[in-house]
Amino acid sequence: MQDSFDVIVIGSGAIGAACGRELALAGRRVLLLDRTPRGGEAWTAAAGMLAPQIEAGPDDPIFQLGVAARERYVELAPALQESVGIDIGLWLEGIARVAVTVEDVPELRARAAWQRQQGHLCDWFDPAEVKARYPWIGTNQGALWAPRDGALDPAALVTALRADAERIGARLELVEAAAILRDGDRVVGVQAGRKFAAEHVVVAAGAWSADIGGLPRPVSVEPVRGQMAALPWPEGIEPAIVHGGDAYVVARGAEAIIGSTMEYAGFDPSTTSAGLARIFAGASALCPSLAGLEVKRTWAGLRPVTPEGRPIIGAEPRARGLWYATGHGRNGILMAAMTGAVVASLIGEQPIAVEGLAAVSPERFWRW
């Protein structure tokens, strides 16, 4: 075999780049493989929300993991700014989950109460309080308020993580990984045009993870299309993030990022008139000031989604040295930094203590 590394990471989007950076920081010789220069498709369907609290309820097994993932960016953002000079746009000023209908109220109020009981900052605003804070918002029945939730710029994050990984010593090759190479029950490398040898391989290929050859069994990940659009941020309105119904509005610079759909459309990252119409309608209901503004651009990306919506992070039981970091769905940006840290710690045989890892273990699909 040519080119030997300690770890090969297949994929250099938000998840793969975060894994590569953490592994390089740990002193590993790392190779990042990616089929496209921009590093995947999932982050392009992300508004960059760091929002573990606005949807979580008592039955969410990875709620605490999501909160811990959000908090990792408090240290990572300035670290990336210092190391590679890239501002990832971290903004943790709170998100409102709006009750669009009266039917939304009981569940959102219960979520807020449960989170407070767990010791998290969370509140319930009645309609008058919502209007006082967001006078521009549309008809509402109240809102769950998560003051620690926020957002960042996904493109800046991926660029910064990749740049920092390479600065530390990781190598990036723009080539498609065709197959995992094994010797018995042990991983020995990756076939990607030519053979790359490695003791460990991390599958972080997003929606394409299941298409990699040589996996010991099928990986339960499939693509789900998310359509999005950007409009000018309305004049006279303070930057904010609001979520309600099937839509959200995220202030990023001078733009309002709106989205998003969840469509099982295979590997087709196209926008559709029907999909865009849905998100325009939902966003305009949240923020009527958006109605009639000129659309600056539209796009779509492909999220990797598992059957129950939780990522797959950890070791493949049937192949020593094979690791998964995929299937993050709508939470790839939120979970990127934490996933990188978890994977690096597991490979280094010094797992970090964070609640919720059992719920994302690969073994959950095959434990029978």
Image (cartoon, rainbow, N blue to C red):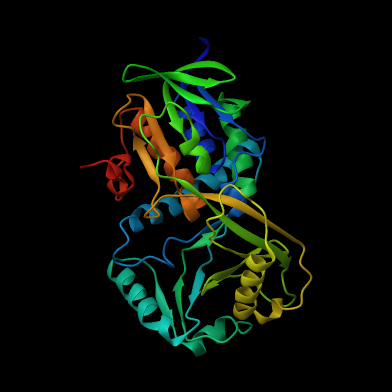
- Total marks shown come to 0
Q: Position of residue 314 (x, y in %)?
A: 35, 37
Q: Which of the image's four quarters has the C terminus?
A: top left
Asked if residue 130 shows in the view, the reply is yes
Q: Is residue 150 above or below residue 41?
A: below
* Front in this rendered view, residue 186 or 215: 215
Give the residue drawn at x 54%, y 35%: 11
Q: Horizontal placement of 220 versus 152: left or right?
A: left
**Is 44 located above or below residue 104 in the figure?**
above
Where is residue 49 shown, x and y percent of the image?
54, 59
View extreme (bottom): residue: 128
Figure quadrant of residue 58: bottom left
**77 versus 26 height, above or below:** below
The residue lying furthest to the top in this view is: 1
x, y (%) of residue 107? 36, 77
Find residue 308 and report its image quarter: bottom left
Furthest-left residue in view?
368
Q: Is residue 18 visible?
A: no
Residue at image coords 49%, 25%: 179
Front residue of 70 and 108: 108
Q: Is residue 38 left or right of residue 32?
A: right
Compared across the picture, whether 272 is left or right of 246 comes to: right
Residue for point 31% across, 20% down: 185
The percent position of residue 245, horizontal first and vertical second, equals 51, 75
